[in-house]
Amino acid sequence: MINYTDELRRHNLKATPQRLAISNALHSSGHINIDKLYELMLKKFNSISLATIYKNINLMLENSYIQEVKIPQNKSVYELTKNYHSHLVCTKCEEVEDIKLNMNPILSEVNSNSNFEISKTDVVLSGICKDCQ
Amino acid sequence: MINYTDELRRHNLKATPQRLAISNALHSSGHINIDKLYELMLKKFNSISLATIYKNINLMLENSYIQEVKIPQNKSVYELTKNYHSHLVCTKCEEVEDIKLNMNPILSEVNSNSNFEISKTDVVLSGICKDCQ
DNA sequence: ACCTAAAGGATAATTTTTATCCTTTGTAAC
DNA sequence: GTTACAAAGGATAAAAATTATCCTTTAGGT
């Protein structure tokens, strides 16, 4: 149970109990979608409003406290902002895991093929995870 | 104005005027979201229903006639199914373009780092396109 | 030309997300 | 520790996005 008070404040977010709980849910799940997050939060705060979830997710996104990961053929999941990484998605159990990949080969390939100035790369690799094989 | 009758039938889709028009809109725009597609279609069929757009997009996706591309911080766009490729998204003009990239460096990196069996890769590179620089 | 399953249009219903409004609370200043 | 106030939470309405329903029309095989 990590205390995210300072981390929230560093992103200009007041450290409310709901936000601390959301932070911990994101941390322990790694990646979670809105519905599952709401379910989890209801266990801690039996009267938390779905609007609170949405308002916080949006504010946390704006302040770069969290990131959205768009999953092919599925709902978006959210994660605490970390160093740059890519994602592996298991199409069977739907788990999402982080993976650090070297983007240089791709970036240099784009440079030589086009005049595009890349500022961000989003890579999602789908397949079957170790446990599901 | 390409005739997509056969191509539709090859994907078990009846060649209706609406579907032929959607096919051409996808072809000429390259990538388009639901709203813009609906706008375009209204110009051809002044009484086309938005439900028709949704029903067709979903059926075309199921039959792999088209593909969805999830754009970071934006709405999904749709494209006619083509050979595998990645996407460049301009964060200024929002245009999406295809780019052929060699995924082998990434795939072999995943192989050596994990036991994940990759079946699909989705790569979206965001930045500023040639025209917007 | 005929038949029938499938598609289109209109619209209702659902689902998802955002806005509103009032009460409560985190936090900075004293 | 108290106070003050902007900001956050909860309840709920509203809006936006997507899907379902139902009846009419039509594509495409016979």
Image (cartoon, coloured by chain):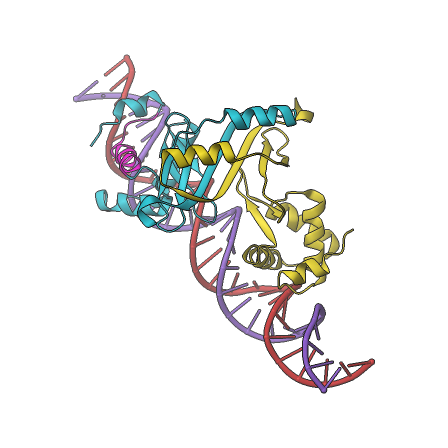
Chain colours: A yellow, B cyan, C purple, D red
- Residue at 26% x, 27% y is B4
User: What secondary structure do most residues of the magenta stretch adopt?
Assistant: helix
Instruction: Between residue D21 and residue B108, name the one nearer to us.
Output: B108
Seen in the image, is A30 located left or right of residue B100? right
- Specify whether residue B47 is in view: no
Q: Nearer the viewer, residue D15 or B35?
A: B35
* Depicted B52 relative to depicted D6: above or below: above
Q: Decide if residue A83 is in sight here.
A: yes
Q: How many marks?
A: 0
Residue A128 on image: x %, y %: 61, 26
Which residue lies at the image location 37% right of the left edge and 44% below the top edge?
B34
Residue A40 % position (x, y): 70, 49
Q: Quarter-wise, where is residue A21 in the image?
A: bottom right
Query: Eyeballing the image, is B129 above or below A110?
Result: below
Q: In terms of image quadrants, where is residue A63?
A: bottom right
A125 to A2, vertically: above or below: above
Along the line of sight, the residue nearer the viewer: B46 or D25 = B46
Horizontal placement of D28 versus A82: left or right?
left
Residue A5 position in % (x across, y down): 72, 60
Q: Say left or right for A20 vs B33.
A: right
Question: Is A80 within the magenta?
Answer: no
Q: Is residue D7 rendered to the left or right of residue B15?
A: right
The stretch drawn in magenta includes residue B16: yes
What span is in magenta? B13-28
> Which percent across, then down, holds residue C12?
42, 50
Residue at the spot x=69%, y=53% of the render? A23
Q: Quadrant location of the N terminus of chain B? A: top left
Quadrant of res A59: bottom right
